């Protein structure tokens, strides 16, 4: 099975069921990310692998002191071995083969089914600029991007997404 030079960072508190949905959706892809980094204050790699059966996915776990979602995402990115990184919340599921042609940062033209069954999909930049559209689940960034602003409670990815729009 081919792999893509992409690290996926997923953050989870303690919901092994939601994490399982996310990891299994990545494990069944033909074009898999190079690695998945699970950031959690409670789950260890041995516990994850004990509870979730995976066939092909390379998973590593990073202990998070519980300082918040954006801090956890920064911590996961710091561990990434790939040039590209994508963030998924535990419970998000990837559908189709979104990584088959991934060679550069950008907005993914596919749907991600999120926890709570909300859907994220590619939209025009004009919609993004009016406050609808992308969030971190539908974007592939360079792993060298600047840290998320941990002082934001929501939308800490907004500045990074606007930077990406300006680069297009």
Image: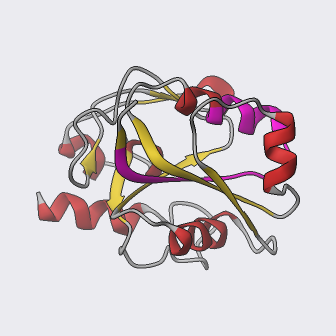
Q: How many dots with numbers?
A: 0
Residue 64 located left or right of residue 162? right
Residue 88 located left or right of residue 48? left
Q: Residue furthest left?
A: 168
Coordinates of residue 42 in the picture (x, y in percent): 88, 59
Question: Which residue is at the front of the view, 52 or 64?
Answer: 52
- The residue located at (40%, 25%) in the rendering is 30
- The residue located at (26%, 41%) in the rendering is 127
Which quadrant is the C terminus positioned in?
A: bottom left
Q: Is residue 9 magenta?
A: yes
**Highlighted magenta segment, given as a residue range:** 4-23
Residue 150 located left or right of residue 108? right
Question: Does residue 77 appear in the picture of this structure?
Answer: yes
Q: Is residue 164 magenta?
A: no
Coordinates of residue 61 in the picture (x, y in percent): 71, 59
Q: In the rendered view, would you say 127 is above or below 31? A: below
Which quadrant is the N terminus positioned in?
A: top left
Residue 119 located left or right of residue 19? left
Question: Which residue is at the front of the view, 13 or 6?
Answer: 6
Coordinates of residue 12 in the picture (x, y in percent): 75, 51
Question: Does residue 133 appear in the picture of this structure?
Answer: no
- In which quarter of the view is residue 43 placed? bottom right
Question: Which residue is at the front of the view, 22 or 71?
Answer: 22
- The residue located at (36%, 75%) in the rendering is 144
Coordinates of residue 52 in the picture (x, y in percent): 78, 33
Q: In the rendered view, would you say 137 is above or below 43? A: above
- The residue located at (44%, 48%) in the rendering is 135
Q: In the rendered view, would you say 142 is above or below 139? A: below
């Amino acid at each position: 099975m081919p792999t893509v030079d992409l690290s996926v960072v997923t953050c989870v508190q303690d919901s092994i069921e939601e994490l399982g949905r996310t990891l299994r959706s990545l494990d069944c892809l033909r074009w898999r990310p190079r690695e998945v980094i699970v950031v959690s204050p409670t789950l260890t790699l041995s516990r994850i692998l004990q509870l979730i059966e995976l066939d092909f996915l390379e998973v590593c776990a990073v202990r998070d002191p519980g300082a918040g979602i954006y801090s956890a995402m920064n911590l996961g990115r710091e561990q990434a071995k790939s040039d590209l990184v994508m963030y998924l919340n535990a419970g998000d599921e990837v559908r189709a083969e979104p990584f088959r042609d991934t060679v550069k940062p950008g907005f993914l033209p596919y749907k991600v089914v999120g926890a709570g069954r909300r859907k994220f999909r590619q939209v025009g930049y004009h919609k993004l600029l009016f406050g609808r559209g992308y969030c971190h689940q539908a974007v592939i960034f360079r792993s060298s991007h600047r840290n998320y602003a941990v002082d934001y409670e929501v939308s800490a990815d907004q500045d990074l997404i606007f930077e990406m729009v300006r680069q297009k």
